[in-house]
Image (cartoon, grey):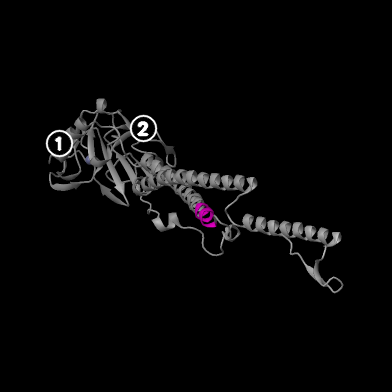
Amino acid sequence: MSKVKYYYDPDTLSYRKIEPRKSRRYRNIALFFLGSFLFGFLGLILLLNTNLVNTPRELSLAREVKNYELQFEFLGKKMEQIENVLANIEDRDNNIYRLYFEANPIPEEQRRAGFGGVNRYKSLEGFNNSEMIISTTKRLDIIQKQMVIQSKSLDEITKLAEEKEKLLAAIPAIQPIKNEDLARMASGYGWRSDPFTKARKMHWGMDFTSPKGTPIYASGDGTITRADNNASGYGKHIRIDHGYGYMSLYGHLSQYNVKSRQKVKRGDLIGFVGSTGRSEAPHLHYEVWKDDERINPINFYYGSLTAEEFENMLKYATQENQSLD
Ligand SMILES: [Zn+2]
């Protein structure tokens, strides 16, 4: 209610009402509306700046962010599975493959190392979810590095396996005379009585008694270094260089089937049993050398003998009988 104003009229000696002018009334009404509008507008702005009321766009953005967070959580779980599988592969790599091929295990710190130096994650900083995004990216980077290291390790093992395969093919591993052609294993490696002098003497190989002309086979892959009659005692003999420090020797042959410098594979026919050189009867004198030392050939037949046959041979080979030289 607007204040009623009066003025003193000296003519009538009384107070009279001041009638407000129409224009003033309109101005008051306009001011009232303007004030109300401004007040309401300020209130609205204040309200929107608090979190009490969200616009539909804000609501949809918030939902989207929630969805991203959920997706990151799933990703985290999947990465955990990958990390577990990788850890398992690395464990086998270190404790089986690398161990088997005598390679040093790759240390844990080296496999799990992140990236040092410049901050690779700078561009990801300064957001609400920076921590989550950076930690996920870091984990992925480490997984990626682990995979590279694992892959390199497997390359190395493949190489080592190929080497090992070559080594296994090279070293003497079969009996140089077939079991069915063998009359008997006459004498083994060790102290034996000499067939000529009857004195006790070291016998550096194994004697296989067989008829003259029985085929003799290479006991491992290699190169023929000698096939001649120029070494005292051995008569016509063959030597095969197998590499890796191994050499095999076949003595008292009647005939050669190979020439010097020829390459042979395990099981190739190289010559025939005879009794040339210092020999009492047709037989093959077989020696295995490692790093220029003659070693017991009994340990180099695992490629051809059954357990029972090996047992039998061992019995004969260890008997202190007379060698055929
Ligand atoms: Zn002998």
Rounded to the nearest angstrom, the CA distance separating label 2 from label 1 is 25 Å
Q: Amino acid at mark 1?
A: Lys
What residue did someone put label 1 on?
A: 315
Amino acid type indicated by mark 2: Gly
Residue 274 within the magenta-colored segment of the rendering: no
230 vs 136, nearest the viewer = 136
Location of the N terminus by quadrant is bottom right
| Spot occupied by residue 59 in the image (x, y as percentages of width and height) | 60, 46
Residue 122 image position (x, y, % from top left): 58, 61
- Identify the magenta region: 130-137
Q: Position of residue 254 (x, y in %)?
A: 31, 33
Judged from the image, the quadrant occupied by ligand 1 is: top left
Residue named by callout 2: 267
In-front residue for pair 253/80: 80
Task: Look at the numbered disc 2 and give the secondary structure of its residue.
Answer: loop
Q: Residue at x 20, y 36 (%)?
A: 280
- Looking at this view, name the residue that lies furthest to the bottom: 10
Relative to 148, say whether 15 is above or below: below
